Amino acid sequence: MTALTQSQLDQIVQKMEADKQSLLHEIRGELENSGDQQRIELLNHEPGDSGDESMANALADFNVTMLDRQVQGLRDIEAAFRRVKDGEYGVCIDCGEDVGFPRLQAYPTAKRCIVCQEKRERQYVQEGHPTM
Ligand SMILES: [Zn+2]
């Protein structure tokens, strides 16, 4: 279980909700610029709770490369919301330790504690992959 208090969790969920809205706003702006009615329709019919995931998937299916960052961000947020629901939010997926509130405040979608994250990034560098 996560060591976050309910009010800390609420605070982060609120922040993610705001981040999500601003990502959707950016996506909408791009789509409106592109003048693609079909995609704009998709955003206008944003499904409720359970449908959010399919929305990111649907957007990804369009393969709008200029929206990659936003779609990825949306996915991360949706995954984080799922972890909140499952009671797994704030727990490092690698070592099972608490990610920690300060880190989650800065990176609400963080899946790993700072130690595991750094370890992972070092591994990527060693394997010759550029870090994100
Ligand atoms: Zn860890």
Image (cartoon, grey):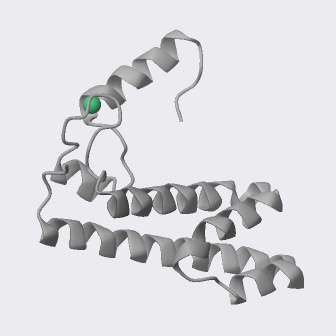
Can residue 24 be seen here? yes
Placement of 116 over or under 27, stated as above or below: above
Ligand 1, by image quadrant, is: top left
Q: Position of residue 64 (x, y in %)?
A: 80, 60
x, y (%) of residue 118? 33, 26
Residue 18 left/right relative to 40: left
Name the residue: 76% across, 81% down. Answer: 42
Q: Is residue 110 above or below residue 50?
A: above
Residue 31: which quarter of the image? bottom right
**Residue 19, located in which quarter of the rendered image?**
bottom left
Q: Residue at x 87, y 81 (%)?
A: 38
- In the image, 117 versus 54, the foreground residue is 54
Q: Position of residue 113 (x, y in %)?
A: 27, 36
Dividing the picture into quarters, in which one does residue 43 lie?
bottom right
Query: Height in image: 89 above or below 37?
Result: above
Q: Residue at x 26, y 50 (%)?
A: 90
Residue 109 drawn above or below residue 81: above
Total numbered labels placed on residues in the image: 0
Residue positioned 55% across, 71% down in the render:
23
Q: Residue furthest top?
A: 126
Task: Please state the horizontal and vertical placement of residue 37, each as a whole percent of the image.
Answer: 88, 85
- Front-most of residues 121 and 38: 38
